[in-house]
Image: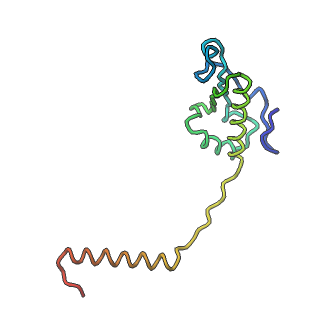
Amino acid sequence: MIRITHRISLDDDELKESFVRSSGPGGQNVNKLSTAVELRFDVRNSPNLPDDVRHRLERLAGSRLTQDGVLILMADRHRTQHRNRQEALERLTELIREASIPPTPRRPTKPTLGSKKRRLEAKGQRSAIKRLRSGKPED
């Protein structure tokens, strides 16, 4: 069980890891060992994600989400498989934590008196310039 927040936990069997050869640092190890981690998490079919979190996570994932709703995270920054696994898991938990925070509603605001006056002055100046172009005399 992977604890994300106090109300969200993921089962270990929901995550699928595969190891591929890394293009990062490591010298000859890059050519011999599969240290990069490809972590897959099925967002749409996860029973442990609430619907609101699922929708926000799909938006946050962007191009990392396949059309089937599977989130794919690649981690190949480190030289060891263990560190890359940890990094991929940390990135997944951080993404889900971010998705679990509900958006704050927009608070409507009114323009200030000064901004209204500046807007009207600018409109008047533009109007005067256009009036001069047309050749009509001013009132």
Q: Quadrant of residue 94?
A: top right
Q: Is residue 12 above or below residue 108?
A: above
Relative image position of residue 23 (x, y in whole percent): 58, 21
Q: Quadrant of residue 19?
A: top right
Q: Quadrant of the N terminus?
A: top right
Relative image position of residue 9 (x, y in whole percent): 79, 38
Residue at image point 17% right, 78% down: 135
Relative image position of residue 26 (x, y in whole percent): 63, 20
Q: Quadrant of the C terminus?
A: bottom left
Residue sitting farthest toward the top: 32
Relative image position of residue 83 (x, y in whole percent): 72, 27
Q: Is residue 123 above or below residue 94?
A: below
Colouring style = rainbow
Residue at image point 64% right, 15% down: 29
Residue at image point 48% right, 75% down: 115
Residue sitting farthest toward the front: 27
Q: Is residue 14 left or right of residue 30?
A: right
Residue sitting farthest toward the bottom: 139
Q: Quadrant of residue 91?
A: top right
Q: Is residue 38 above or below residue 123?
A: above
Q: How many marks?
A: 0
Q: Is residue 35 above or below residue 3?
A: above
Q: In front: 92, or 59?
A: 92
